[in-house]
Image (cartoon, grey):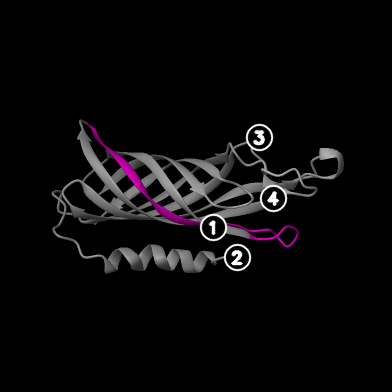
Amino acid sequence: MRQLRPQILLSLAILVPLLVPGSSFAQSGYQYSISLMAGLGGTFNSEPASSTVAETFVRDDQAEFGFQVNFNMEIDRGTLFGVRVGQYDVELSNNGLLGLVSLPVKSELTYATLAGEYRIPAGLYESGFFAGLGYFAVDGQGIFENDSGIGLTVGTTGDFKLNDRLSLMIEIAVNYAEMDYLQFFVIGSAGFAYHF
């Protein structure tokens, strides 16, 4: 399948939320927020199902570094619509002759998700739960074939208010993608959100 370029994903992250009408401004007076986050991600179910020779898969023996940009819009009290765009490093490998694994090749997992989120005040922070759909793509780096697919995302967030406009964001997400190279990808991220 053809892979979306990161520029297209970033454009979607900015434009789609602006097209969704909001019913009211947030109780804090700010309806939108943008977050810049970094974190670690890894897969725990990436071995290919078949035992054919040279079956490609994403290695699951280590966590990889990446980044994510979130754009949230409050559409009702405690209810948000969010777009997440991110990119994480992955290592591609394959099963060679006699089941031996070839040397891994550094690659990238790029994704964009659309999700609804529910927030609950919890003292010094707000806790949230989100679920939605996403597009995931792994770049084959010219050696392996590109792989992409539609998937699901679920996760939890913590929004720790630092001042009137800034907060510390922590997020854990589990993503499922219908791809040959990987199925489940877990991401833990932290960063700062600006509310406006």
The residue singled out by tag 4 in the image is 106
Mark 4 and mark 1 in contact? Answer it, CB < 8 Å.
no
| Front-most of residues 52 and 87 | 52
* Cα–Cα span, label 3 and label 4: 14 Å
Mark 3 and mark 4 in contact? Answer it, CB < 8 Å.
no
Between marks 3 and 2 in the image, the one whose residue lies nearer the viewer:
2
Question: Looking at the picture, which amino acid does disc 3 mark?
Answer: Asp
Between marks 4 and 1 in the image, the one whose residue lies nearer the viewer:
1
Question: Looking at the picture, which amino acid does disc 4 mark?
Answer: Lys
- Please name the residue shown 50% across and 50% down the image: 67
> Label for residue 61?
3
The residue singled out by tag 1 in the image is 149
Looking at the rendered image, the quarter that the N terminus falls into is bottom right
Work out whether mark 3 precedes mark 4 in sequence or the reverse, and give the earlier one. Answer: 3
Q: Name, please, the residue furthest toward the right.
A: 97
In magenta, the rendered stretch is: 124-146
The residue singled out by tag 2 in the image is 1
Would residue 142 be counted in the magenta stretch? Answer: yes
x and y percentages locating residue 139 in the rendered image: 64, 59
Mark 2 and mark 1 in contact? Answer it, CB < 8 Å.
yes
Drawn side of residue 114 relative to residue 122, left or right:
right
| Front-most of residues 16 and 161 | 16
In the displayed structure, 175 sits above or below 144; it is: above
